[in-house]
Image: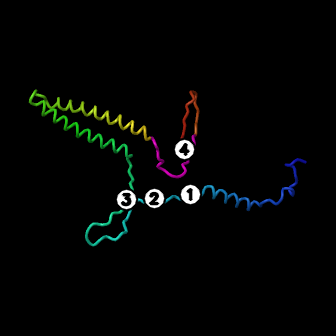
């Protein structure tokens, strides 16, 4: 007699159908139980008492920037470059006004040249700076699961295929 052909009494006590169904339901409930979501505050209310006169005590406010610091720096640098080249263009226009009858279009073209050179220098510097400090910080905490199911239907004389993505 092999192991699979042993009589039922040799297997020991077995669960009844009701007990097996209850145990299966418990296992399924434990697996598919929704994980509790961490509450994230969407606003802040300062509960500290306000003084009757004068300035209020400063309250620490966390820094929640959407734009990375290097991108904000590049934006500020480009604004500075624009303001600087405008000043340079005005200076060139004033200097050359007496020497030649230079048109406004010529001054704008010269300013665009200086702006392009300065912007290229800032972009190259930002690229080198960003390449040196390539440390990435994860934004999201917690497990990420992706459930993708693809249904494919192929039919017809010329094999027309339709893919349906369920996600």
Q: Residues within 10 Å of mark 3 (few under 14, many from 20)?
A: few
Quadrant in the picture for residue 121: top left
Q: Distance of mark 1 from mark 3, alpha carbons?
A: 30 Å
- Please tell me whether mark 2 sits on a helix, a strand or a loop: loop
Between tags 2 and 3, which lies in front? 3
Residue under label 3, please give it: 61
**Relative vertical location of residue 40 with respect to residue 77 in this rendering, above or below:** below
- What range is drawn magenta here? 134-150
Count of numbered tags: 4
Between tags 2 and 4, which lies in front? 2
**Relative vertical location of residue 59 with respect to residue 147 in this rendering, above or below:** below
Q: Position of residue 116 (x, y in %)?
A: 27, 32
Q: Distance of mark 2 from mark 3, alpha carbons?
A: 15 Å
Residue 40 bears which disc, if any?
Answer: 2
Q: Distance of mark 1 from mark 2, alpha carbons?
A: 15 Å
N-terminal-most mark, 4 or 3: 3
Quadrant in the picture for residue 15: bottom right
- Please tell me whether mark 1 sits on a helix, a strand or a loop: loop
Between tags 1 and 2, which lies in front? 2
Q: Position of residue 99 (x, y in %)?
A: 10, 27
Image point (58%, 27%), residue name: 157
Q: Distance of mark 2 from mark 4, alpha carbons?
A: 29 Å
Q: Are marks 2 and 4 in contact (CB under 8 Å)?
A: no
Residue 166 bears which disc, if any?
Answer: 4
Quadrant in the picture for residue 46: bottom left
Front residue of 42/87: it is 87
N-terminal-most mark, 2 or 3: 2
């Amino acid at each position: 007699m092999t192991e699979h052909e042993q009589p039922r009494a040799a297997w020991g006590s077995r669960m009844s159908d009701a007990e097996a169904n209850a145990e299966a339901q418990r296992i399924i409930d434990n697996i598919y139980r929704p994980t509790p979501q961490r509450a994230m505050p969407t606003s802040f209310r300062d509960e500290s008492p306000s003084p009757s006169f004068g300035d209020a005590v400063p309250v620490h406010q966390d820094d929640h920037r959407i734009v990375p610091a290097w991108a904000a720096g590049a934006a500020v640098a480009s604004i500075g470059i624009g303001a600087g080249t405008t000043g340079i263009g005005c200076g060139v226009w004033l200097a050359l006004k007496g020497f030649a009858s230079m048109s406004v279009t010529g001054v704008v073209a010269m300013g665009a040249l200086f702006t392009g050179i300065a912007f290229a220098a800032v972009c190259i510097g930002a690229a080198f700076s960003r390449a040196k400090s390539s440390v990435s910080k994860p934004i999201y905490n917690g497990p990420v699961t992706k459930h993708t199911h693809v249904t494919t239907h192929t039919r017809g004389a010329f094999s027309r295929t339709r893919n349906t993505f369920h996600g």
